[in-house]
Amino acid sequence: MKLLKISLLLLLTFSFISCFEDRDDNAVSASEINDFVWKGMNAVYLYKENIPDLANNRFATNGEYADYLNSFDTPETLFESLIYESETVDRFSIIIPNYIEFEQLLAGTSKSNGLEFNFYFKPGSSTEVFGIIRLVLNNSVADNLGLQRGQIFDAVNGTPLTNDNLNNLLNQDTYTLNLATYNDNGTEMVDDDSIDSSTDSVELTKQTFTENPVHQADIIDVDGENVGYLVYNGFNRNFDSQLNAAFAEFQANNVQHLVLDLRYNPGGSVNTASLLGSMITGQFTGDVYSKLVYNSDLQELNTNFEFVTSFDGNTINSLNLNKVYILTTSRSASASELVINSLSAYIDVVQIGDFTTGKTQASITIYDSPNLSAEDINPSHTYAMQPLIANSINVNDVEVPSNGLVPDITLIESPRNFGTLGDINEPLLALALADIEGIGRINPFTTGEFRPIKTNINIKPYEETMYINSDLVLDRLDLE
């Protein structure tokens, strides 16, 4: 059997281990949601074959199945038990307690003050932390207050930052940043650097905000040739037209080179990633750009994404390039990696920056409904899931390695010199422009390596996620 057919009404006759409040203050049994969790994972999970509890013949009777569901206190614990090697292989599948909020976030709308940060340990310390503004979103609260990339702070609400408190301090809706400066003490050494506190501060309050991921599009003259520079921060299908408009500007200005800045792009829509590939090129229409490969039960869903000339009735503005420069950090993930991996089979891709995240798998949002889609959802709870369901590979069947894509030119962003996005002296962009000028690919000398501390402060809903449009999967999924 593909899915064990068990009536939720029947399940409710069994004793439940726990109940909790969910939608409309109605008591919802853990087992009711657990039924959705197991059936959804059994139906689509990429690593189903590696999880014995997800086998199609795992349960001989409905009672055995009900006992299994009742052995888990919460949907989260069941979900976690079904994940394959969560520390190394599947680091990305998630269960979603409130899909309504999640859908809003996927559309680019959230409560935000418009700031994204990197955090580092202060020189010589393993506990004291300072932050640096890496990105100020356009037309946000922070943008309207005049905050800028590269500004440093070492306290929030007057409390010095540490590795233990920074998440709590900065996840508040309203807080005050206490600004500071980076002091290199006039030497090339990092050990004698210091973070000097100041009396300057700024208060920020988060508001409902929709981010346009097409953050910046510039045209730079390099020796008489136009270079397009695009900062793109998320593969959000709601902004495909804005992405295409940026390429229209590049096309109109006869852009001959492109620097695509994906350093803060954690991923998003597979389809948007394929559209971006078609915008960069244009000479490979009809050829396979990337592929999605599902588990052995779902091989009929395997899909090829081709280079195309249009979407939603819009003609794609293509640059017909044979070479592209892509800037990355360790936060460049999933759909960003898909673009690099897929284009590299056709054109020269020069990756500059840091190793990427290392995520080759794609996911989809599934709901507690007859066909796991967003139609006829069970009204008694708001749980959904975003499990990995397919591997993304390029035309040559090459996937993104789990340790990330290796840059051609390595440079880790440093708070000593963050630079301004789009400025020809900003370190990563400067390396791309030097290569375009023919100065050569020289790995830059750095006096010290700064790697940011991982936090959940900048996490976006599609962080490290590559998601598939549901109609490409669920309409073809046989759940009978």
Image (spheres, rainbow, N blue to C red):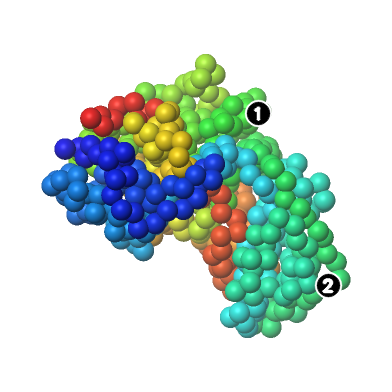
> What residue appears at the point 65 percent right and 55 percent down from the top-left corner?
116
Q: In the picture provided, is 432 more to the left or to the right than 335?
A: right
Q: How many discs appear?
A: 2
Compared with 476, 68 (above or below) is below
Q: In the picture provided, is 478 more to the left or to the right than 434?
A: left
Mark 2–mark 1 Cα distance, whole angstroms, equals 42 Å
Q: Considering the image in quadrants, where does the C terminus appear? A: top left
> What residue appears at the point 43 percent right and 24 percent down from the top-left corner?
308
- Upstream in sequence: badge 2 or badge 1: 2
Q: Which residue is mark 1?
A: 249
Q: In the picture provided, is 140 more to the left or to the right than 477?
A: right
Compared with 39, 443 (above or below) is below
> What residue appears at the point 69 percent right and 43 percent down from the top-left corner?
208
> What residue appears at the point 65 percent right and 78 percent down from the top-left corner?
128
Find residue 311 and report its horizontal and vertical position in percent.
Answer: 49, 22
Q: Which residue is mark 2?
A: 198
Amino acid type of disc 2?
A: Ser
Nearer to us: label 2 or label 1: 2
Q: In the picture provided, is 119 more to the left or to the right than 84?
A: right
Classify residue 453 by image quadrant: bottom right
- Which residue is outermost to the top? 313
Amino acid type of disc 1?
A: Glu
Looking at the rendered structure, the secondary structure element under dot 1 is helix
Looking at the rendered structure, the secondary structure element under dot 2 is strand
Asked whether residue 242 is in view, the answer is yes
